[in-house]
Each structure stands twice: as C-alpha cells, then as structure tokens.
Image (tube, helix red, strand yellow):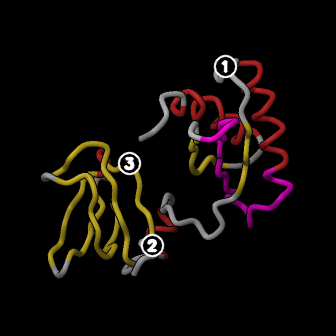
C-alpha cells in the first residue's frame, strides 16, 4: 500500500529531478521504521546513474521537502539508483526486454486481476501485450501501475 504522502512527494520531486537532468523512478515511504525512511530511486537517462547524481538529488530534494513542509516529523531521506532497474518505463526498455518474464500491476482490477505474470510481447500507445502460457493478454496502459522484470524466473 502506498503511503498517502507519496503522490505529493512525487509531484514535488519530479521537477526537482528534471532540473538536474534526472528522472524519478520510484518513491517509497517506509513509516514502519524509526525514524521513517523516504526512499527515492532516480535514473540519469543520459548515462549510468552515479553517486554524484544521488548526492545532487538528495541536496535539492531535501531543501524542497523542508520548504514545502510535507512531512511533519523527522525522517531519513535515501536517494539511490535502482541499479539495473527492475521496472520498465521507457519505450527502449520495453523493446530491450521483449520476451522477458514480467509482472504487471494494475491500479484497479482488469479482467478480475490486479497482477499479471507472463512474457512481455510489446507495448504500443494504448496497450501492453503479455504472453501468458501461449495466450496473448492485452492490458490497457491507462490501468497499468508498473511493469517489473520478474526476477523469480
């Protein structure tokens, strides 16, 4: 379950990252830890994401979060790179990982499921196509919350 502050944090973090030439990949707020941990994964679309990128984003985001006062209590900010990203986002990634096992999560149930597991066929403007044991599943992109490489396979 996503923490209710995450959408506000994404709204704040996305332009901060863009200003630095970076992209926000994922944000998770772990409130079960003391102090809570806000984890922000970033990517440098031009080159491998490095420590310098994480440091620049951490400083800029920390200043913006403090100024916006979105998080009322003390927290730890962790900015990192997802490494070889498990989440597919760009058209290039969808092309590169064609045929790979993936897990597709939808924001609401689609055809009775919120999670779909199969092999990635392709993605177009409106649909992601998944091979599920020889059957082609067409999932509308508007319902897709995320597409992850299935590393369990």
Could you tell me which residue is drawn at 13 percent across and 52 percent down? Answer: 112
Report the residue marked by disc 3: 145
Residue under the image location 56 percent in, 44 percent down: 28
Which residue position holds label 1?
Answer: 72
Q: Position of residue 114 (x, y in %)?
A: 25, 52
Question: Magenta residues?
Answer: 33-54
Q: Quadrant of the C terminus?
A: bottom left
Distance in Å between CA atoms under marks 2 and 3: 19 Å
Q: Secondary structure at mark 1?
A: loop
**Could you say which quadrant of the image residue 142 lies in?**
top left
Q: Residue at x 62, y 46 (%)?
A: 24
Report how far apart the C-alphas of labels 1 and 3 lie in the structure.
Answer: 27 Å
| Circles 1, 3 touching at the beta carbon (< 8 Å) | no
Q: Is residue 63 left or right of residue 44?
A: right
Is 71 left or right of 63, judged from the image as shown?
A: left
Tag 2's secondary structure?
A: helix
The answer to whether 138 is drawn above or below residue 75 in the figure is below
Q: Which residue lies under the disc numbered 2?
A: 95
Residue drawn where x is 71% and y is 54% of the image: 80
> In the shown orientation, is residue 51 left or right of residue 86?
right
């Amino acid at each position: 379950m996503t923490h209710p502050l995450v959408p506000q944090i994404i709204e704040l973090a996305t332009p901060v990252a863009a200003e630095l030439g970076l992209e926000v990949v994922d944000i998770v707020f772990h409130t079960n830890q003391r102090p809570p941990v806000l984890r922000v994964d970033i990517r440098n679309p031009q080159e491998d994401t490095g420590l310098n990128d994480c440091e620049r984003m951490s400083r800029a985001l920390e200043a913006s979060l403090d100024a916006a006062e979105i998080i009322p209590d003390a927290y730890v900010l962790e900015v990192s790179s997802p490494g070889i990203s498990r989440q597919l986002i760009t058209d290039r990634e969808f092309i590169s990982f064609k045929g790979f096992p993936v897990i597709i999560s939808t924001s609401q149930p689609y055809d009775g499921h919120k999670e779909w597991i199969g092999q990635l066929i392709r993605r177009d403007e409106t649909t992601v196509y998944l091979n599920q044991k020889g059957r082609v599943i067409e999932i509308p992109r508007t319902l897709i919350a995320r597409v992850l490489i299935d590393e369990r396979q």
